[in-house]
Image: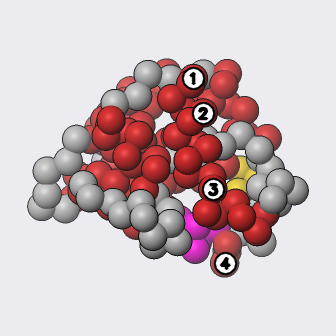
Amino acid sequence: MQIQNLEFDQMTGALLKDPKYCQMKQYIQHGRCSTYDHCIAVAKLCFLWGRKLPIEVKEKEMVRGALLHDYYLYDWHNYDGKRHGFRHAKIAEKNASRDFSLSELEKEIIRCHMWPLNISSIPLCREALLVCLADKVVSTQETLFMR
């Protein structure tokens, strides 16, 4: 497990230290959890699943997509909260594309993470599906246990 933690840290370290990325620390996601911490939790779960499940994934792109899936950079509780669930994936993709160099797979991961709420953004690759599922698991945990 220690080797996996080191590999995850090496894979994510530069992005997690980026000042633009660190802006997410100031926004609450669910319960008392920041958007920054939420995205790290989703990325860690995806990393773990990618290592444990008998499927092949593009690990680095999946982890980067998970880290950036909620890179919308606003407090959704005070900003059009009712429509946030439907809109923020596209906003996060736009912001992440502006601030970082993204692959098409990373863009798809960000764009599709809110399926099935965003019915037209079906995750068609394993990486996007894992991020979508991990986001649901982590969001549920944060909502139920971090109040």
Indicate which disc, 2 or 4, sits on the residue closer to the N terminus.
Answer: 2
Q: What residue is pinned by disc 4?
A: 144
The structure residue drawn at horizontal position 52% and vertical position 71%, both measured from the top left corner, is: 117
Indicate which disc, 4 or 1, sits on the residue closer to the N terminus.
Answer: 1
* Position of the C terminus by quadrant: bottom right
The Cα–Cα distance between marks 2 and 4, rounded to whole angstroms, is 29 Å
Instruction: Please give the label number shown on residue 95.
Output: 2
Q: What's the magenta region? A: 137-142
The structure residue drawn at horizontal position 44% and vertical position 22%, both measured from the top left corner, is: 101
Indicate which disc, 1 or 3, sits on the residue closer to the N terminus.
Answer: 3
The Cα–Cα distance between marks 1 and 3, rounded to whole angstroms, is 19 Å
Image height of 3 relative to 16, above or below: below
Check disc 3 and give the amino acid type: Arg
Mark 2 vs mark 3: in front: 3
Residue 93: x %, y % from top left: 52, 40
Q: Secondary structure at mark 4?
A: helix
Instruction: Please give the label number shown on residue 87.
Output: 3
Asked if the magenta segment contains residue 101, the reply would be no
Indicate which disc, 4 or 3, sits on the residue closer to the N terminus.
Answer: 3
The Cα–Cα distance between marks 4 and 3, rounded to whole angstroms, is 23 Å
Closest to the observer, 8 or 117: 117
The structure residue drawn at horizontal position 51% and vertical position 29%, both measured from the top left corner, is: 97
Q: Secondary structure at mark 2?
A: helix
Image height of 121 relative to 8, above or below: below
Instruction: Please give the label number shown on residue 99.
Output: 1
Q: Residue 63 appears in which quarter of the rendering?
A: top left
The Cα–Cα distance between marks 2 and 1, rounded to whole angstroms, is 6 Å
Q: Secondary structure at mark 3?
A: helix
Count residues near mark 4 (Cα–Cα under 10 Å), then give few for <14, some for 14-19, many for 20+: few
Mark 4 vs mark 1: in front: 1
